[in-house]
Image (cartoon, rainbow, N blue to C red):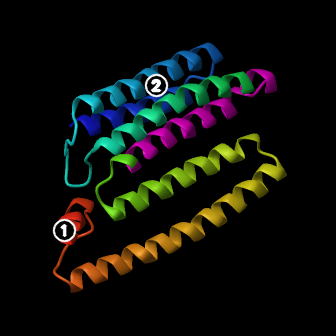
Amino acid sequence: MELVLYFSGVVFWGLLAFLIRNRKGQISIATLFILWQLAFSGYLFTKPNATWTSYFRNDALSVIFVAVLSITAIFTIINSFIYFHHRNEKPLIRSIYLLALFLFFGCMTGVFLSNNAGLLWILTEATTLAIAVLIYHERTIESLEATWKYVFVSTIGLSFSFIGIILLDLSLKGSGGVDLFFSSINHSLL
Protein backbone atom coordinates (compact mmCIF):
# COMPACT_ATOMS: atom_id res chain seq x y z
CA MET A 1 0.00 0.00 0.00
CA GLU A 2 2.84 2.37 0.85
CA LEU A 3 4.46 1.89 -2.55
CA VAL A 4 1.20 2.45 -4.39
CA LEU A 5 0.80 5.69 -2.45
CA TYR A 6 4.39 6.73 -3.21
CA PHE A 7 4.21 6.01 -6.95
CA SER A 8 0.76 7.62 -7.17
CA GLY A 9 2.25 10.70 -5.53
CA VAL A 10 5.12 10.79 -8.03
CA VAL A 11 2.67 10.65 -10.93
CA PHE A 12 0.42 13.25 -9.25
CA TRP A 13 3.26 15.74 -8.65
CA GLY A 14 4.61 15.14 -12.16
CA LEU A 15 1.25 15.74 -13.82
CA LEU A 16 0.62 18.77 -11.64
CA ALA A 17 4.01 20.23 -12.63
CA PHE A 18 3.10 19.55 -16.25
CA LEU A 19 -0.33 21.17 -16.04
CA ILE A 20 0.63 24.24 -14.02
CA ARG A 21 2.83 26.32 -16.28
CA ASN A 22 3.76 29.35 -14.17
CA ARG A 23 7.21 29.40 -12.60
CA LYS A 24 6.16 30.07 -9.00
CA GLY A 25 3.60 27.28 -9.11
CA GLN A 26 6.18 24.87 -10.46
CA ILE A 27 8.67 25.86 -7.78
CA SER A 28 6.03 25.11 -5.15
CA ILE A 29 5.20 21.78 -6.76
CA ALA A 30 8.89 20.87 -7.03
CA THR A 31 9.35 21.72 -3.35
CA LEU A 32 6.40 19.50 -2.44
CA PHE A 33 7.84 16.72 -4.60
CA ILE A 34 11.18 16.99 -2.80
CA LEU A 35 9.35 16.77 0.53
CA TRP A 36 7.42 13.76 -0.81
CA GLN A 37 10.67 12.04 -1.83
CA LEU A 38 12.37 12.87 1.47
CA ALA A 39 9.34 11.69 3.46
CA PHE A 40 9.33 8.37 1.63
CA SER A 41 13.06 8.05 2.16
CA GLY A 42 12.59 8.72 5.88
CA TYR A 43 9.74 6.21 5.98
CA LEU A 44 12.04 3.54 4.56
CA PHE A 45 14.38 4.06 7.52
CA THR A 46 11.51 3.15 9.86
CA LYS A 47 10.72 -0.07 7.96
CA PRO A 48 14.00 -2.00 7.69
CA ASN A 49 13.81 -5.17 5.62
CA ALA A 50 10.15 -4.64 4.76
CA THR A 51 8.58 -6.67 1.96
CA TRP A 52 5.55 -4.93 0.47
CA THR A 53 4.89 -7.35 -2.36
CA SER A 54 6.94 -10.14 -3.84
CA TYR A 55 8.18 -7.56 -6.37
CA PHE A 56 9.29 -4.82 -3.96
CA ARG A 57 11.28 -5.00 -0.76
CA ASN A 58 13.85 -2.87 0.97
CA ASP A 59 17.07 -3.73 2.69
CA ALA A 60 19.78 -1.58 4.25
CA LEU A 61 21.49 -0.90 0.93
CA SER A 62 18.31 0.13 -0.89
CA VAL A 63 17.42 2.50 1.96
CA ILE A 64 20.83 4.17 1.65
CA PHE A 65 20.49 4.44 -2.14
CA VAL A 66 17.02 5.97 -1.89
CA ALA A 67 18.32 8.44 0.71
CA VAL A 68 21.21 9.45 -1.57
CA LEU A 69 18.78 9.75 -4.49
CA SER A 70 16.50 11.97 -2.40
CA ILE A 71 19.36 14.26 -1.44
CA THR A 72 20.46 14.35 -5.08
CA ALA A 73 16.89 15.32 -6.04
CA ILE A 74 17.14 18.46 -3.91
CA PHE A 75 20.23 19.75 -5.69
CA THR A 76 19.05 18.63 -9.11
CA ILE A 77 15.76 20.49 -8.83
CA ILE A 78 17.38 23.63 -7.40
CA ASN A 79 19.94 23.69 -10.22
CA SER A 80 17.21 23.01 -12.78
CA PHE A 81 15.32 26.13 -11.76
CA ILE A 82 18.53 28.19 -11.79
CA TYR A 83 19.18 26.87 -15.30
CA PHE A 84 15.59 27.65 -16.37
CA HIS A 85 15.94 31.19 -15.06
CA HIS A 86 19.17 31.87 -16.95
CA ARG A 87 17.89 30.31 -20.17
CA ASN A 88 14.46 31.93 -19.88
CA GLU A 89 12.83 28.60 -20.73
CA LYS A 90 9.33 28.44 -22.15
CA PRO A 91 6.71 27.16 -19.69
CA LEU A 92 5.89 24.10 -21.82
CA ILE A 93 9.55 23.04 -22.03
CA ARG A 94 9.89 23.51 -18.26
CA SER A 95 6.73 21.47 -17.66
CA ILE A 96 7.90 18.54 -19.79
CA TYR A 97 11.31 18.64 -18.12
CA LEU A 98 9.83 18.53 -14.61
CA LEU A 99 7.43 15.72 -15.49
CA ALA A 100 10.30 13.63 -16.89
CA LEU A 101 12.52 14.47 -13.91
CA PHE A 102 9.89 13.46 -11.35
CA LEU A 103 9.18 10.23 -13.24
CA PHE A 104 12.91 9.53 -13.38
CA PHE A 105 13.21 9.87 -9.60
CA GLY A 106 10.16 7.64 -9.12
CA CYS A 107 11.48 4.94 -11.46
CA MET A 108 14.94 5.11 -9.91
CA THR A 109 13.39 4.62 -6.47
CA GLY A 110 11.57 1.61 -7.90
CA VAL A 111 14.87 0.26 -9.23
CA PHE A 112 16.41 0.44 -5.77
CA LEU A 113 13.44 -1.33 -4.16
CA SER A 114 12.90 -3.95 -6.86
CA ASN A 115 13.06 -7.61 -5.83
CA ASN A 116 12.62 -9.08 -9.31
CA ALA A 117 15.15 -9.09 -12.15
CA GLY A 118 12.47 -8.56 -14.81
CA LEU A 119 10.90 -5.63 -12.98
CA LEU A 120 14.36 -4.18 -12.38
CA TRP A 121 15.00 -4.28 -16.13
CA ILE A 122 11.64 -2.61 -16.91
CA LEU A 123 12.22 0.19 -14.40
CA THR A 124 15.78 0.71 -15.66
CA GLU A 125 14.42 1.02 -19.20
CA ALA A 126 11.86 3.55 -17.91
CA THR A 127 14.67 5.63 -16.40
CA THR A 128 16.42 5.53 -19.79
CA LEU A 129 13.32 6.92 -21.49
CA ALA A 130 12.86 9.63 -18.85
CA ILE A 131 16.49 10.69 -19.20
CA ALA A 132 16.09 10.76 -22.99
CA VAL A 133 13.32 13.34 -22.54
CA LEU A 134 15.59 15.32 -20.21
CA ILE A 135 18.45 15.29 -22.71
CA TYR A 136 16.20 16.46 -25.55
CA HIS A 137 14.53 19.26 -23.58
CA GLU A 138 16.32 22.04 -25.53
CA ARG A 139 14.85 20.78 -28.83
CA THR A 140 17.96 21.42 -30.93
CA ILE A 141 19.71 19.28 -33.53
CA GLU A 142 22.59 18.70 -31.11
CA SER A 143 20.29 17.61 -28.28
CA LEU A 144 18.43 15.29 -30.68
CA GLU A 145 21.74 13.73 -31.71
CA ALA A 146 22.81 13.37 -28.07
CA THR A 147 19.45 11.81 -27.20
CA TRP A 148 19.67 9.20 -29.93
CA LYS A 149 23.26 8.35 -29.01
CA TYR A 150 22.23 7.97 -25.37
CA VAL A 151 19.21 5.82 -26.21
CA PHE A 152 21.27 3.69 -28.60
CA VAL A 153 24.11 3.05 -26.17
CA SER A 154 21.79 2.51 -23.19
CA THR A 155 19.53 0.17 -25.13
CA ILE A 156 22.48 -1.95 -26.21
CA GLY A 157 23.52 -2.33 -22.58
CA LEU A 158 19.96 -3.04 -21.49
CA SER A 159 19.58 -5.58 -24.30
CA PHE A 160 22.59 -7.47 -23.02
CA SER A 161 21.18 -7.36 -19.50
CA PHE A 162 17.84 -8.65 -20.80
CA ILE A 163 19.61 -11.54 -22.51
CA GLY A 164 21.37 -12.19 -19.20
CA ILE A 165 18.02 -12.20 -17.39
CA ILE A 166 16.62 -14.71 -19.89
CA LEU A 167 19.68 -16.94 -19.51
CA LEU A 168 19.50 -16.63 -15.72
CA ASP A 169 15.84 -17.61 -15.79
CA LEU A 170 16.54 -20.60 -18.00
CA SER A 171 19.43 -21.78 -15.84
CA LEU A 172 17.44 -21.35 -12.63
CA LYS A 173 14.42 -23.20 -14.04
CA GLY A 174 16.69 -26.04 -15.15
CA SER A 175 18.26 -26.37 -11.72
CA GLY A 176 15.23 -26.46 -9.49
CA GLY A 177 12.50 -24.09 -10.58
CA VAL A 178 13.57 -20.94 -8.77
CA ASP A 179 12.03 -17.73 -10.12
CA LEU A 180 13.67 -14.36 -10.83
CA PHE A 181 13.02 -12.87 -7.40
CA PHE A 182 16.29 -11.84 -5.79
CA SER A 183 15.21 -13.21 -2.41
CA SER A 184 14.57 -16.64 -4.00
CA ILE A 185 17.84 -16.56 -5.92
CA ASN A 186 19.76 -15.73 -2.74
CA HIS A 187 18.12 -18.57 -0.80
CA SER A 188 18.80 -21.08 -3.57
CA LEU A 189 22.48 -20.15 -3.65
CA LEU A 190 23.00 -20.53 0.11
Q: Residue at x 46, y 19 (%)?
A: 32
Q: Which residue is mark 1?
A: 190
Q: Position of residue 149 (x, y in %)?
A: 72, 62
| 132 sits left or right of 119 in the view | right
Q: Position of residue 135 (x, y in %)?
A: 69, 46
Crowd band around label 1 with a 10 angstrom C-alpha radius: few (<14), some (14–19), many (20+): few
106 shown above or below 38: below
Please state the total of marks drawn on the protein image.
Answer: 2
Q: Residue 95 in magenta? A: yes
30 shown above or below 177: above
| 78 sits left or right of 67 in the view | right
Q: Are marks 2 and 1 in contact (CB under 8 Å)?
A: no
Q: Residue at x 75, y 28 (%)?
A: 89
Closer-to-camera residue (114/12): 114
86 shown above or below 165: above
Instruction: State which tag comes first along the sequence, 2 or 1.
Output: 2
181 shown above or below 109: below
Q: Residue at x 25, y 79 (%)?
A: 172
Q: CA distance from mark 2 to mark 1?
A: 40 Å
Q: Which residues are magenta?
A: 84-111
The circle on residue 33 is 2
Crowd band around label 2 with a 10 angstrom C-alpha radius: few (<14), some (14–19), many (20+): many
**Judging from the image, what secondary structure is the residue with disc 2 in?**
helix
Q: Quadrant of the N terminus?
A: top left
